[in-house]
Image (cartoon, rainbow, N blue to C red):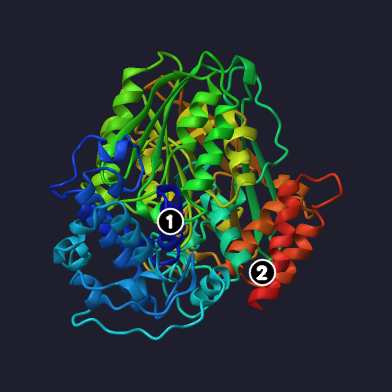
Amino acid sequence: MMDKKRFIQEYKKLKQEAAPDLWGRIEGGLRSHPERPTGGEGMGMEKKPGKPVFWQGKPVYQLAAAAAAMLALAIVAPQITGQNKNTASGEAPAMEAQVMAEGGDAGGAAETTAAGTWAIAAAEDGMAEAAAPKEAAGGAMLQEAEGAAPQPAQRIAPQAVPEREAKAAEDMKNGGRDGANGSGGFRREEYGYLSENGFQKVAKEPVSTFSVDVDTASYGNIRRMVRSGVPVPEDAVRIEEMINYFPYDYPDPKGKEPFSVTTEYSDCPWKEGHRLLLIGLKARDIDFERRPASNFVFLLDVSGSMYSDDKLPLVQKSFAMLAQNLTENDCVSIVTYAGEEQVVLDGAPGDQAARIAAAIEDLEAGGPTAGAAGIQKAYELAEKHFIPGGNNRVILATDGDMNVGASSEGELVRLVQEKKKGGVHLSVLGVGTGNLQDSKMEALADNGDGNYHYLDSLMEAKKVLVEEMCGTLVTVAKDVKIQVEFNPEYASAYRLIGYEDRLLANGDFDNDQVDEGEIGAGHRVTALYEVIPADKGAQEGRELKYQAPGSFVGSSELLTVSLRYKKPDGNASMRMEHPVEALSYRKEQSENMAFASAVAEFGMVLKDSKYKGSSTYKSVAELAEACVRLDSDSYRKEFLELVQEAERMYR
């Protein structure tokens, strides 16, 4: 007979190949089954986060749950995807849903399906009598999966199953259809609408205000799409996150200031006659060995949508890697959530890396997604183990698909805004393909005083959680705002490139009640303005019927960059000013500016911006190539390869 271990293996394989979203709905219904106890008394196995629910109950429940879930995934999913999926036995013919649902002889189907194999195993264990009731065999339970099973049952002709990766890429190219593994298309991926910044006339709007952004999720997500050969949605392209993914050679801050300010003014590569202004901030580095003690709560989504290899397995490896870099001064708690939240680890010392890794390794995905309950519990643990003067942070890893309890972006944002008042930050790590809820995760991180990153590989996890650990996890300045005032004598119009969802009203700059972006230790922040010089563009103010052009004060300054920020534990902001002389213009760009320009161009080409001018993939590659040498960091080299790959893919 099939043992439990073999059954789980076959079940997991079928789950992965036959619609994880359906699997999540099935498990959600099974959790309320009357035969399922709240404790872990099933077959002598204790209840563990993410374990299949059919292991968690009496024998009658186990068989009923297993049969319902296996039947649903074996029968219903092929009808959704138009395919029959391979099981452990090979290419399986279509099952007879009606026969199985009525508890009849399933022998023929049982020979070739994991569901049937389990039925045989159950009979050998003397539990076959439990399969007799129609609802136990899958009739009523199958209908609980949102009526997905057709009535009457239909025979589905077997089809060959293409390679999952090829199917996913093809689906996405053909309009974003969902693939059978939940990753074959981005139709269910959600991105917040972005209205690209346009030019502002200096005569009418001389001041531009925005908050800093050190998120990098957009670049990692775009990299995933380009490598898969699929179209990049316009709203997935946040140019400031692409630019800020890369390090730039800015000077260290002097004195007691938390960051330095660097500006450059040169020609715009994609529009003749226009110029480009770079504003760069470099936060103070701290000695890793002397960093504040950290109180971490790893909040891990273990719902059914996290099943695939690019989700929970990647998260497990990533957090185990982070645990290797903690010390006895740190504290780690782990909370998981699927149909319900569970505390897996409560305040373990950071130097117990093996214990932390073992707790993470034991997790499995399955069930619906009660994200709000998980967030609540994570903040409770963070407050329980709060370290005064330390780094108190919840790190959420998810694909963002929350469907139980408070699940809307507004509800979750309000929850996070309320919880952060206690001094606990929230960082978000997005993972996966197919149903990535990008806008929701960005909003959570922004309102939780944290950062948002996307992990598309273990190498990216190493960059975010190990190489940039201090910057990602230790805040040196909060509520950082930038305001730029242009002098109409030298600038006719300007356009802020990116930062569309970071724009502020000018009056918010001096308002300490407005909560904005944070900068971590060693972080660099870069912003670009495209500027139309006054002697190159029209004097727009003179076109007004009722307004004469303003008089100039005769200053030699092109503009002034002002900054406001608060100390990590402060409530009152401080102000810095950095004037930029008009004579600072240089025709030739520095390497910093040239590379940032190339990244900005890449973003504009990907989203087919109306402001892209002469930009093409080829021009981006030429501009970036001049900044990539043998001794350049691997991220710049990878960028050049990505641009070249995009040129081959999308031209």
Q: Which mark is residue 12?
A: 1
Q: Secondary structure at mark 2?
A: helix
x%, y% of residue 396? 41, 39
- Location of residue 85 (image quadrant): bottom left
Out of 525 and 327, give the one closest to the viewer: 327
Relative horizontal placement of residue 243, taking residue 644 as reference (left or right): left
Can you say which quadrant of the picture contains the N terminus?
A: bottom left
Q: Quadrant of the C terminus?
A: bottom right
Q: Is residue 609 above or below residue 592?
A: below
Q: Given the image, on which type of amino acid does mark 2 rest?
A: Ala
Which labelled disc corresponds to residue 530? none
Viewer-proximal residue among 426 and 200 = 426
Examine the rendering and report whether any part of residue 538 can be seen.
yes
* Residue 268 spot, x, y in % from top left: 68, 60
Give the tally of numbered discs: 2
Of callouts 1 and 2, the N-terminal one: 1
| x then y, percent, for residue 398 | 41, 47
Which disc, if any, is residue 646? 2
Q: Amino acid at mark 1?
A: Lys
Say left or right for 41 vs 202: left
Q: Is residue 149 left or right of residue 203?
A: left
